[in-house]
Image (cartoon, rainbow, N blue to C red):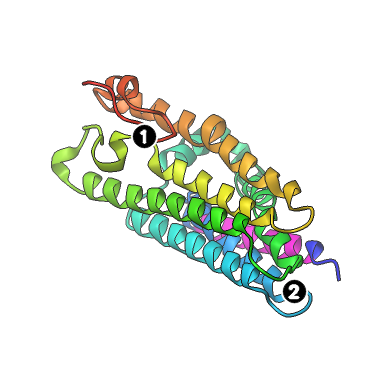
Amino acid sequence: MNIFPVLILVLFLYMTAFFIVAMIRKDNSLADIAWGGGFVILTILSFFFSPGEAEARQVLVTCLVTVWGGRLALHIFLRKRGKGEDYRYAKWRKDWEKYFVLRSYLQVFMLQGSLLLIIVFSPVYINLNPSRGLTWFDGLGLLVWTSGFFFEAIGDYQLGKFTGDPGNKGKVMDKGLWAYTRHPNYFGESAMWWGIFFMALSIEGGWITILSPITITFLLLKVSGIPMLEKKLIESQRGYTDYINRTSPFFPWFPGKK
């Protein structure tokens, strides 16, 4: 059975459902919550459609994606609880005017769904191609994934504590992991997908899943991650330009002098 049409249909219905709720609540930033959950659903679905008995690699990768996607969705839900629409979506709501509903559906929810489908290709490929025995690629992948999860989860935790203190309003977060990279959470997310790609290399033809980590890394570095966020931070936080000058933008490195 070709499972990809099923995955596409499930993802289409999933993102459409979030779109409908977003229109009712007037909050397109619900798409950010849908992001992590979509990976979990498609990965688990591909796991259950796997031919034959489940192997260790499939169980491991499915668990890793579930932990990552579940944590991310919960983190974003808790972060935005009681708050309004994220500034990015609020700006588009204003800019798109009478085409807001159509563009929201196509450029927010369907576009994110399409990108999600590309990025989730690596765990889906692993689940649909069972192979006995773990290799050193799996060990390397797990090490890279674990390092990435540490950077994303701890980075989010440190930032949450910092922004939760009213005394830090308008200040630059440059403590903890944020002293070594301006975006430890983005670096961590990218690293996790490279880790899963390394695991896929244990399977014949697994190299084709390199599209997954390349896509997410490109998005974070050049599109919706660092560029959009830093433009806002430069405008809203005094001293952020100095922080840029002394801190690595993505890969962790020793900070320069203040």
Q: Residue at x 61, y 62 (%)?
A: 17
Q: Is residue 206 above or below residue 40?
A: above
Circle 2 sits on which residue? 49
The residue closer to the viewer here, 257 or 114, is 257
Q: Residue at x 48, y 65 (%)?
A: 67
Q: Report the amino acid beneath label 2.
A: Phe
Give the structural element (helix, strand or loop) at label 1: loop
Q: Is residue 29 left or right of residue 243?
A: right
User: How packed is label 2: few (under 14 Cα within 10 Å), some, or many (20 or more)?
Assistant: some
Q: Residue at x 70, y 62 (%)?
A: 126
Q: Is residue 162 above or below residue 242?
A: below
The residue closer to the viewer here, 117 or 247, is 247
Residue lying farthest bottom? 53
Give the structural element (helix, strand or loop) at label 2: loop
Q: Residue at x 63, y 67 (%)?
A: 57
Q: Where the C terminus falls, by quadrant?
A: top left
x then y, percent, for residue 180: 32, 34
x then y, percent, for residue 95: 53, 31
* Label number found at residue 86: none
Asked whether residue 23 is in view, the answer is no
Q: Report the amino acid beneath label 1.
A: Thr
Q: Quadrant of residue 133?
A: bottom right
x then y, percent, for residue 127: 70, 66
Asked whether residue 129 is in view, the answer is yes
Q: Which residues are magenta?
A: 6-24
Circle 1 sits on which residue? 181
In whole angstroms, how far apart are the C-alphas of marks 1 and 2?
40 Å
Exactly how many numbered labels are in the figure? 2
Residue lying farthest right? 1
